[in-house]
Image: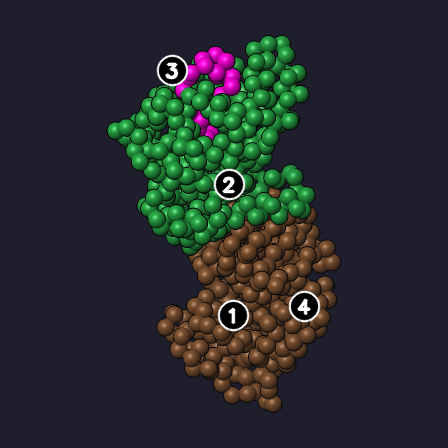
Chain colours: A green, B brown
Amino acid sequence: MFYAVIPAGGSGTRLWPLSRAGHPKFLHALTGTPATLLQATVHRLGALADPESTYVVTGVSHAAAVARQLPALPDANILVEPSPRDSCAAIGLAAAIIATRDPHAVMGSFAADHLVRDGDAFTAAVLSAVDGARDGLLMTIGITPTHPETGYGYLRCGEAVGEGPVSRVEEFTEKPPYDVAVSYVESGRYFWNASMFIWRVDVFLAELHRQQPQLHAGLTRIAAAWDSAERERVLGDVWPTLPKISVDYAVMEGAAATGMVGTVPGDFGWTDVGDFDTLGDVLERDERGNVVIEADDGTVGKSDVVLHDTDRTVIVPRSGRLVTAVGVQDLVIVDTSDALMVCSRDRAQDVKKLVDSLKERGDSGHV
Amino acid sequence: MFYAVIPAGGSGTRLWPLSRAGHPKFLHALTGTPATLLQATVHRLGALADPESTYVVTGVSHAAAVARQLPALPDANILVEPSPRDSCAAIGLAAAIIATRDPHAVMGSFAADHLVRDGDAFTAAVLSAVDGARDGLLMTIGITPTHPETGYGYLRCGEAVGEGPVSRVEEFTEKPPYDVAVSYVESGRYFWNASMFIWRVDVFLAELHRQQPQLHAGLTRIAAAWDSAERERVLGDVWPTLPKISVDYAVMEGAAATGMVGTVPGDFGWTDVGDFDTLGDVLERDERGNVVIEADDGTVGKSDVVLHDTDRTVIVPRSGRLVTAVGVQDLVIVDTSDALMVCSRDRAQDVKKLVDSLKERGDSGHV
């Protein structure tokens, strides 16, 4: 029995004005199909876990939208955090709850807002990771890095475990400085961590107990009360006291140092849909390299898009208006009902700075 | 007594989606002030003609908007053409009507949608042209060309008339082919014709009679009936039969060949507001060269515009939405309530092609 856990949080600032705090990235269809990122994630995991074994951990703002996007999931499998306490609390909550039901279960945690091109290769990689997890490793999936991205974790691979494809991870380094990331990529010895974790819940909780005793104690109290009338009271008391830390820093770096982390290579066309430029690279293009990402939910009329001598441009029409471009290249044009954003593709990361400046102006209506 | 005539027609296709057939260029504030181009034109001519001596010739679609934008003009001075018959019929109609009131009047015709930076220099140039007109010349105002524009008329200057600044025009060539325009500009002997014509109405009508007898006869019939109960019947009968031809081809080329055309230089910062790139050059810029052209009429809310690392970009916010740009240069962004247009400034002329393609698609709602 495999349990799939999907932490669905984060607002996806670099995808503004499409992604907003109130309607974040994972709720949007950015997959080249009508499926939202969240729906595509659940669908992809369907080969590994049935709906009864699939959990989403999300915030109070998005619980209703998540429930409606995933009608096959039992209500009880939508775990709602009272407030954001970063990824270790979110993933740990799911692990602790699953452990009360199935103490030696293998679970995998997968971000709600990533894209995978080759679903079969993804399934095969996870199944290999499950083997490593059964042997007691905290398993990751390693992606061959293409550039010195500083927002990811890096895995230094050691010797193979058994006959492979599992390798032991000698070092797990979350978010290295740029120079360090460059040296990692140049060395050819590192993988990116794809934020996918596969482990036995008992192994993970033991390691959490060793490294983060306060988090472990709190989550254990919450899990014990989960199926009782005390759930909301205990959650309300304990959750706000939980350390706010990502699972990478809280557990993975320290576990790797004691040889407890393993990895399998993941060659399945992974992307974290970090910005509009990435979407332009991974979604289907027309003959001039343009990508039009249609609306998902029918809440706005379909926009007409008319491009004249336009190349390699990413268009996100979400207002129902006519969207046109003449003689432009390598742009991102995001057209929503209350905000327009035009950006160079090579500056797509800086959309975050724009949103920061809107926040500084007190413009809460648009962010 | 000087009569100012303003033919207000043409839809300004290259300013789409701001300018539409139903709300053309001259009705918009593209002047860097709340005044529309039409209002700015009337205001500029106020130094030369009072409202009683100022006429606008416009089409049935725009008569009401023109009347409301120009409350000081008498109703009778807004001449409404039943259908578009090009500029010779429009200007000739005004000339014929003025001639019935003041047979030797000097009139000047000035496009409704041009910008002039230096109003005093403009007035001085027109007053010089009035002198030439009193002497029996069909006067033009010559602009020193900056590039081989093929959409304008070109004036080849001959000897000075009297003590100047009036010169005789040896040749008037409307819309030359590109190669010819290049040779004209390189020769240094040519001016652009700024589509400003100053003449005695009797001189013009005599030349019209010589070159375009049918047009002359029709306009004479209409003018004779203008102040009678027969106006609408005669207009309805005669107007549709008038040759559809511009005044440049109909009268000016032939008049120049007989030595009847004069010119004075006009060094007053003229532009015909042909496209958004031009507006970016002539309107006030911020320190990074960006131009934001605000809404004129208060029918939409004021848009917030937030630019991040953006240069030399022309923004026309007309939807009330937040308009943002990140890391872009030399673009035009026009945001209206039902259509968005993003264009490279160096392709601003090609907006016309985009509109043509919309027409081909049968998209009458947006053009």
**Residue drawn where x is 46% and y is 29% of the image:** A112
What distance separates the C-alpha of mark 4 from that of mark 3? 86 Å
Residue A1: assigned label: 3
Along the line of sight, the residue nearer the viewer: A229 or B66: A229
Asked whether disc 2 touches disc 1, contact meaning CB atoms under 8 Å apart, the reply is no
The residue closer to the viewer here, A337 or B16, is: A337
Q: Amino acid at mark 4?
A: Leu
Residue at (25% x, 29% y) in the render: A163
Q: Residue furthest left?
A: A163
Between tags 2 and 1, which lies in front? Answer: 2
Q: Is residue A131 visible?
A: yes
Q: Which residue is mark 2?
A: A15
Which chain is home to disc 3? A
Whether residues under marks 4 and 3 lie with C-beta atoms below 8 angstroms apart, the answer is no
- Bounds of the magenta span? A95-119
Task: Quote the CA–CA distance across marks 4 and 1.
Answer: 25 Å
Q: Which residue bears the numbered disc 1?
A: B208
Where disc 1 sits, the SS reads helix
Q: Is residue B229 magenta?
A: no
Type of residue at label 1?
Answer: Leu
Instruction: Tell me if mark 2 has few (under 14), some (14-19) or many (20+) residues whose alpha carbon lies within 10 angstroms of its own.
Output: many
Which quadrant would the N terminus of chain B be assigned to in this image?
bottom right
Q: Is residue A229 above or below residue A121?
A: above
Rendering quarter of residue A34:
top left
Residue assigned mark 4: B45
The residue mark sitting in front, 3 or 1, is: 3
* Marks 2/1: CA–CA distance: 63 Å
